[in-house]
Amino acid sequence: MNSVLVVDLFAGAGGLSLGFDKPEDIETIGNIEYDITSLAPNFETILAVEKDDEARDTYELNNLGVETKSDITDVRS
């Protein structure tokens, strides 16, 4: 399956991107196990934009490998 590409604007420390991370393969609710990977699409965060230097540094620690920019005008298609 192809990934749905995500761009995280006003990224802060990266909570939105973490929410798009691939969930665990199996989740137990009560005593019933669900294979949730078959229920959710695969998301891939490819870019984050955050102006605040400290927030961007934290984002980079929490989301290794995601390109970050400090200014939206630096983003090119």
Image: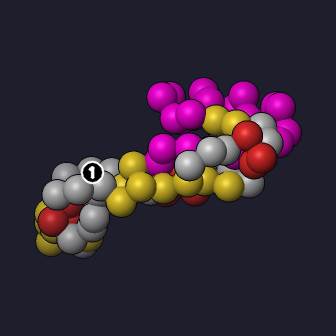
Asked whether residue 55 is drawn in magenta, I would say yes
Task: Indicate left or right for 11 with 2 as reference.
Answer: right
Q: Can residue 31 be seen here?
A: no
Instruction: Say if 34 sits above or below 43 in the image.
Output: below
Question: Is residue 5 visible to us here?
Answer: yes
The residue where tag 1 is placed is 24
Q: Is residue 72 above or below residue 31?
A: above
Residue 38 counted in the magenta span: no
Tally of numbered tags: 1
Q: How is the image coloured?
A: secondary structure
Q: Residue at x 23, y 56 (%)?
A: 2
Q: Quadrant of residue 39?
A: bottom left
Q: Camera-side residue: 54 or 34?
A: 54
Nearest the viewer among 71 and 16 is: 71
Q: Residues within 10 Å of mark 1 (few under 14, many from 20)?
A: few
Residue furthest to the front in view is: 77
Task: Estimate the x, y position of residue 8 in percent, counting from the top left.
Answer: 60, 53
Q: Which quadrant, please, contains the N terminus?
A: bottom left
Estimate the x, y position of residue 34 in percent, counting from the top left.
Answer: 16, 67
User: In the displayed structure, would residue 76 be above or below residue 38?
Assistant: above
Residue shown at 79%/42% (left/top)? Answer: 71
Residue 59 placement: quadrant: top right
Residue 67 placement (x, y as % from top left)? 56, 34
Asked which secondary structure carries label 1, the reply is: loop
Q: In the picture, residue 31 is in which quadrant?
A: bottom left
Q: Nearer the viewer, residue 24 or 60?
A: 60
| Left or right: 24, with 15 as reference point | left
Q: Amino acid at mark 1?
A: Glu
Q: Position of residue 22 (x, y in %)?
A: 33, 51
Q: Residue furthest right?
A: 52
Residue occupying the point 30% across, 55% down? 3
Q: Which residues are magenta?
A: 45-67
